[in-house]
Image (cartoon, rainbow, N blue to C red):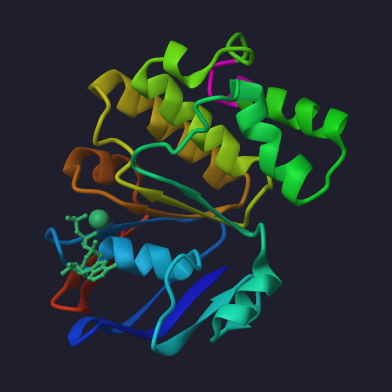
Amino acid sequence: MLEVKGIKKSFKNNEVLKGISFSVESGETAVLLGKSGAGKTTIMRCINGLETFDEGELIIDGQEIKTPSDMKKIRGKIGMVFQNFNLFPHMTVMENIIESPVNVFKRDREESIGKARELLKMVDLEDKEDFYPFQLSGGQQQRVAIARSCALMPRVLCFDEPTSALDPETVNKVVDIINKLKKSGMAILIVTHDVMFAEKVADKKITVKDGYIDSIEEK
Ligand SMILES: Nc1ncnc2c1ncn2[C@@H]1O[C@H](COP(=O)(O)OP(=O)(O)OP(=O)(O)O)[C@@H](O)[C@H]1O
Ligand SMILES: [Mg+2]
């Protein structure tokens, strides 16, 4: 589903990624591990098109991506949940979830609302659709962010440090949600420093070191 082939990326004369290759299959959860500054977030940003890369290619859902313009081919096929959730503060939970499907992808509003309700049920927040983000706990906001990133039914879903602000019980909820998404056939890529969390969700552990992949451990 996701293939990363020989990705290189420099910021000025700092070569952060020196040739990164790995793959994540449909229905698989891969975890990216490595020291602070190793390049994990940069890898994820390259996959999401938030950052360009200098060399190499991505293959996402069978589409080759080499240049920023190739990213158009896979619009909506990759979702990302950011560390700070990035919810729109002036929009309700429901409006946050349907914003991109309705306004960007021009999907039917009623259908999008129906889909959003299913997603809110999946993350256990079906009673919160009219709440604003500030009325929710951090863990609830995180789950809204997950529901929002699933609204376009992406084939690949990326999480950057999804548990860093969560208590252990809420982390277990996130584990359950990730396992449900995995069963639905998504390829899931997670950056985390949380070793216990990684143990619970990972089918594959990928360690990044000095700009290279240091090891790939399949479970
Ligand atoms: N926009 C940028 N401009 C210049 N340098 C950058 C930029 N983004 C990242 N870097 C550099 O790339 C390197 C890797 O950063 P990255 O954020 O990918 O690390 P990370 O593995 O996610 O670390 P952490 O675990 O602390 O989040 C760092 O040395 C950082 O300074
Ligand atoms: Mg990071």
Q: Quadrant of residue 37?
A: bottom left
Q: Say which residue appears at 29% left-offset and 35% top-offset.
A: 163
Q: How many numbered marks, from 0 up?
A: 0
Task: Please provide percent x and percent y for residue 155.
Answer: 62, 57
Query: Which quadrant of the figure contains the C terminus?
Result: bottom left
- Give the residue at the far top of this rendering: 127
Question: Going 27% across and 63% down the picture, which residue do you hit?
Answer: 40
Image coordinates of residue 6 in percent, x first then y, are 37, 87
Horizontal side, residue 104 vs residue 156: left or right:
right
Q: Position of residue 177 (x, y in %)?
A: 48, 33
- The answer to which of 51 and 128 lies nearer the viewer is 51
Judge whether residue 29 is colored magenta: no
The answer to whether residue 121 of the structure is visible from this angle is yes
| Towards the viewer: 201 or 168 | 168
Q: Is residue 57 above or below residue 72?
A: below
From which residue to which does the magenta span run?
121-125
The residue drawn where x is 17% and y is 62% is: 34
Place of residue 216 in the rendered image (x, y in percent of width and height, measured from the top left): 27, 70
Q: Is residue 123 left or right of residue 13?
A: right
Q: Quadrant of the N terminus?
A: bottom right
Dividing the image into four equal quarters, which quarter contains ligand 2?
Answer: bottom left
Image height check: is 30 above or below 138?
A: below
Residue found farthest to the bottom: 55
Hey, which quadrant is residue 150 in on the image? Answer: top right
- For residue 206, say whether it is visible: no
Q: Quadrant of residue 120?
A: top right
- Magenta portion: prevailing SS class: loop
